[in-house]
């Protein structure tokens, strides 16, 4: 198996100045990995919701130029997030396939017989084998989503200050 410190993961968020963030090392079971998994899942769900909204807006054919602009901005934002998730997952698949190739080579050579999992390097030390000194801890149930639309806007509703033109025919 590849040593966990030799792996990197592109995280689903950027730094304050827009640069990519990476998780170095780890087995994918630590706190930051789990947080990144939840953020990725929320981003994918948000993108799916936006696709449905976009289909409804476009099918109604009663939008204003401001609404189309807002829709394009939202679609661009979500597409950027989904692209980042796909890059991250694709890179992890390549690492995973490399691990399988190494394991197959070890099996063919007889291997070293040590199939024990390596410790996670991206999670805090635990004092008990199960959950630490305070028992089982649940992850926070707060949603990590950012709003897809500005507050108060709804699909098909005219935007404040947008020019009103007749619907397309």
Image (tube, grey):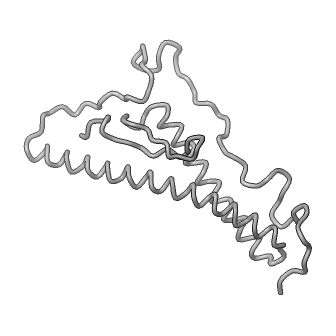
Quadrant where the C terminus sits is bottom right
Name the residue furthest front: 17
**Figure check: 168 above or below 58:** below
Quadrant where the N terminus sits is top left
| x then y, percent, for residue 25 | 36, 35
Quarter where residue 16 is shown? top right
| x then y, percent, for residue 48 | 63, 60
| 70 relative to 62 in the view: left or right | left
| 23 relative to 96 in the view: left or right | right
Q: Nearer the viewer, residue 22 or 125?
A: 22
Residue name at image x 56 percent, y 41 percent: 15
Circle count: 0
| 33 relative to 146 in the view: left or right | left
**Figure check: 158 above or below 152:** below
| 3 relative to 10 in the view: left or right | left
Residue name at image x 84 percent, y 57 percent: 153
Quarter where residue 112 is shown? top left
Quarter where residue 65 is shown? bottom right
Residue name at image x 43 percent, y 52 percent: 89
Name the residue furthest left: 109
| x then y, percent, for residue 145 | 67, 45
| x then y, percent, for residue 154 | 83, 59
């Amino acid at each position: 198996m590849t040593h966990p410190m030799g792996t990197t993961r592109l995280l689903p968020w950027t730094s304050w100045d827009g640069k990519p963030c990476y998780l170095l090392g780890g087995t994918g079971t630590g706190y930051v990995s789990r947080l990144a998994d939840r953020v990725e899942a929320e981003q994918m769900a948000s993108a799916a919701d936006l696709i449905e909204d976009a289909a409804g807006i476009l099918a109604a054919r009663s939008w204003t130029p401001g609404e189309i602009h807002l829709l394009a901005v939202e679609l661009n934002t979500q597409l950027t997030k989904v692209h980042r998730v796909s890059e991250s997952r694709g890179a992890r698949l390549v690492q995973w396939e490399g691990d399988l190739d190494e394991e197959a080579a070890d099996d063919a050579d007889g291997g070293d017989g040590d199939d024990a999992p390596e410790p996670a390097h991206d999670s805090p030390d635990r004092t008990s084998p199960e959950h630490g000194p305070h028992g089982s801890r649940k992850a926070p149930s707060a949603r990590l989503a950012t709003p897809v639309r500005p507050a108060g806007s709804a699909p098909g509703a005219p935007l404040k200050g947008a020019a009103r033109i007749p619907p397309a025919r």
